[in-house]
Image: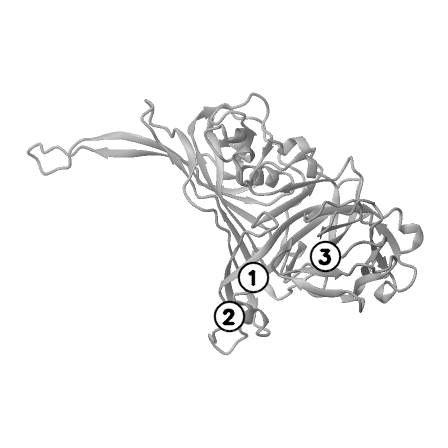
Amino acid sequence: MPQGSRGHVGIKKETTWGARVAGNNDVFLPFVSEGLTRDIEDVLSAIQRGVLDEPRSYQGQRAFGGPLVLEVHPVSIGHILRSALGAPAAAVAADSVETELENCDDAWVHNAAIYGTIDATDKKKGAACVKLIVPAGTPDTTILAYEDFDPVSMRTATALKFWIKTSIALTNVDDLEILFSETGGCAAAPKVLNVGVLAANTWTEVTVATGSLDSEDWDNVISIGLRLGADLAEFTIRIDDVRMVIVGEANIAKKHVFTPMQTLAQEFAGGAGDTPLFPYTFEIFKDEGQAYEFLGCVVNTMNFSFSVSDKIMKANLGIIAKNAGYVDPTALSLETTNPFVWENAKIYLGGVTDPGDRYNDIESFTLNWDNKCAAKYSLNNTAIPRKIIRTGYRDIPISFTVDFTDKTEYNHFLDGTERQMRILFQGAKVGADAANTPYTLQFDIPLLRYTAWPVNIGGPGRLSVSVTGKAKYDAAGYALLVSLINDQDVAIYAA
């Protein structure tokens, strides 16, 4: 008698929707359960034939797909993200880990000659950016503004990364400098880095190498700032999302950043294919003879969940396929990485400064993704789908259960304030890169809008709240950004 415990699910990238590519499966999914089926429509005749029983019926359109539940492991989940969100760009693949030093949501302490504030409209991330208006004639070497924070070790940092926009072009690499220091206000012996050449009125993500900091013992950094490097005309500076970057062994740990598709060129086959989502062939062996083969499978919906009771992170997928058949099963070879578990999770709300923005009272969390796609049929002499099409706006519902400790987030719900959120999982270290880089799965949500924050007394026990909300598209160019660090080459998830 066939046993589910002897089953497996292997997947293989497709280059043409609905056509299997020769060769071994790319991975075998660490699945918990599957519900992929072949549904055949029952088309009922409408003729009257002198009897009270229903008329004859005929087979109609064929539908393929269903649910699939996985444990989330660092390698296989990349293929799921690729199908649902799109392929990561090779240019952004790296082995670096970014830690936010300053979210720039509040004003920095500025020089008396400088006008300093925040801008909640023209920003790149979170609630606001820092805005500075620098008058003409401001002497060079003037510290324009600074921000102090809790001590951070930067001994292993290799670069600073930040978004910046200036109202005039900066034509020399040393026109503007960014500083960090182990003294408040960047007052004593700061590390001085050139911001570089900037185009006018353009948000630019700048990465500035710090050089080796380990030998200089930068383990107690408490301030960052901006300093004028040249005498310039009056201009305005906006700066946002200042991060330190730690890079491990480039040939071991690699970072894959999945930005949801927005243009036709980013879709499967550059928008010229029969599906906007990236397709796979699924081989499902049910411990009986040949394996079931589902062709043209795409991930239409994803649900990521974890909690203090469901301790291994799960992904519940909704699969749409083009066709199905049988295939000889291949030998099972599961990935050897550990899954992401509840104790790996760090959840940040309102910013991503660690540990200041950490939200530690959540006990369960669910993030949903819905591509709003459907199979489309046509008069093309077949009963299987002709293509997969988008039918509406994507949406990203989020829910979590949290202890009711104060009214801070409840008031954000009442005010309609949109909140920045990050969910960060860091597991075991990646191979020989154990000094720096862990297996990582990170969800960045620039704008979370609460839709319900029901505070109710259900009895004599503690008060908890089942919160719901939605991730919203932001000026950063996405509603959800997913970063994955593992030991896989960039090409494995390429378009």
Q: Earlier in the sequence, mark 2 or mark 3?
A: 3
The residues tagged by marks 2 and 3 sit, at their Cα atoms, a distance apart of 34 Å
Question: Identity of the amino acid at label 1?
Answer: Glu
- Determine whether the residue tagged by mark 3 lies in a helix, strand or loop: strand
Q: Position of residue 403 (x, y in %)?
A: 57, 69
Residue to which mark 2 is pinned: 414
- Determine whether the residue tagged by mark 2 lies in a helix, strand or loop: helix
The residues tagged by marks 1 and 3 sit, at their Cα atoms, a distance apart of 26 Å
2 and 1 marks in contact (CB < 8 Å):
no
The vertical placement of 22 against 58, above or below, is above
The residues tagged by marks 2 and 1 sit, at their Cα atoms, a distance apart of 11 Å
Q: Nearer the viewer, mark 2 or mark 3?
A: 3
Residue to which mark 1 is pinned: 418
Q: Is residue 156 visible?
A: no
> Left of 53 or right of it: where is 301?
right
Q: Residues within 10 Å of mark 3 (few under 14, many from 20)?
A: some
- Within the image, what quadrant is residue 41 found in? top left
Residue under the point 55% across and 33% down: 265
Question: Identity of the amino acid at label 2?
Answer: Leu
Residue under the point 51% across and 64% down: 467
Q: Nearer the viewer, residue 120 or 188?
A: 120
